[in-house]
Amino acid sequence: MENNIKATYSLRELIVYFLKLGTWGFGGPVALAGYMHRDLVERKNWISEEDYREGMALAQLAPGPLAAQLGIYIGYVHYRLLGATLAGLAFVFPSFIMVVILGFVYMQWQGIPQMQAVFYGVGAAVIGIITLSACKLTRKSIGSDKYLWGIYLVSAAYTIWQEDENIFLFLSAGTIYWLLKSPPQSFRLSQAKPGVTKAIGLPMLLNISVNTSGQTLWQILLYFTKAGAFVFGSGLAIVPFLYGGVVKEYGWLNEQQFTDAVAVAMITPGPVVITVGFIGYLIGGFPGASIAAFATFFPCYLFTVLPAPYFRKYGKHPGIKAFVDGVTAAAIGAISGAVIVLGKRTFTDGFAIGIALFTAGILWKYKKVPEPLIILVAAVIGLIVKSVINMS
């Protein structure tokens, strides 16, 4: 067996942790990856630093949402397929229920101005949270290695420039660092990249619409399967792909509805990609939401659990470890670059910058302050600020 280290936690404890993270974990993939490192590696010591790095590398190399794949891999580390499955479901389920409820409310009220006001405050606070998370990840993973710092800076600069992530950049980073640290003569390439080949109580909420044809549900299944299987990058990387199909190709949503769907994804906890549940609900009610979410997340589940045994078996090889370290440096560079990209979009005025700085300062000085409390306070501030602006 490739890992004989006994788990110091139960499967039930792991499931409860991911249920909580899916319920209170705001901030998108940058923050969520940081939370997992802080909670599971640093505080609880459930997962080793090496296992975490392997999970980050695999999540970056495979298509699909980074945070969900990292959570699935962490579940696999000690509890294999059952752990991966239950951890993934526990992580996604709370935010899925939330977006279905918001979809129901949205359909009844036909608009979410209050949500946008909440996002104003929450979005600014999130930037403060993910900035600290990115700094901690950088300091912990990059260390003083000048080559890793070079990879990190190039990846961060590319992400800021293109506002996107590139799978070939990650592969190149891993390959370059492998060549520097473990030359090919002591390492067979065939082992280097084994995985790259890769109930809601209200009946109305279910909204099982007779107007949604079986053909439409089938189209939802096929389209969102493509979104989950072929879109690389984390979080908002899937948004341009969804826009092209949902708005342009099929005309399921108009421009405003799609913008509101992205806003919902940003103001709800859990993976940002859960916006597919909201979009699916607007298209086809609860069946549409369920099919869209399943079709998006199932491919990323397969792309994680299928290569995971090889990462576990060969991950200690010097060549593979060097490859993983290079990919991880590029991944963390991309995450740090994404913080700046998101900041440019979020900081629309001085109030937003102030909320972000205040959040970062509080978390830096008082490390035990719970993020959900900060998110709640920021949401209230956002509502107040927007109300004052609209009145003036």
Image: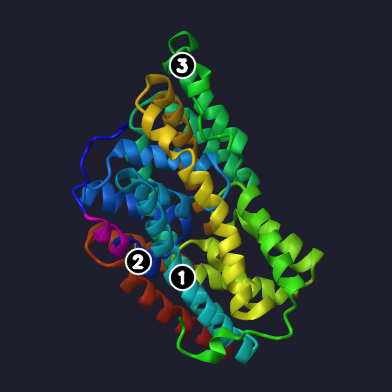
Find the distance from the CA under tag 3 to the CA under tag 2.
41 Å
Label 3 CA crowd tier, 10 Å (few <14, some 14–19, many 20+): some
Residue type indicated by callout 2: Leu
Q: Nearer the viewer, mark 3 or mark 2?
A: 2
**Marked residue nearer the N-terminal end (1 or 2):** 2
Mark 3 or 1 closer to N-term? Answer: 1
Q: Magenta residues, as a range?
A: 10-16
Name the residue type under label 3.
Answer: Leu
Crowding near the residue tagged with mark 1, few <14, some 14–19, many ≥20 C-alpha atoms within 10 Å:
many
Residue type, numbered disc 1: Ser
On the image, the x and y values in percent for residue 221 come to 67, 63
Residue 312: percent from left, percent from top = 37, 34
Q: Secondary structure at mark 1?
A: helix
Q: Which residue is mark 3?
A: 180
For residue 19, the mark is 2
Q: Residue 285 appears in which quarter of the rendering? A: bottom right
- Secondary structure mostly seen in magenta is helix
What residue does disc 1 label? Answer: 95
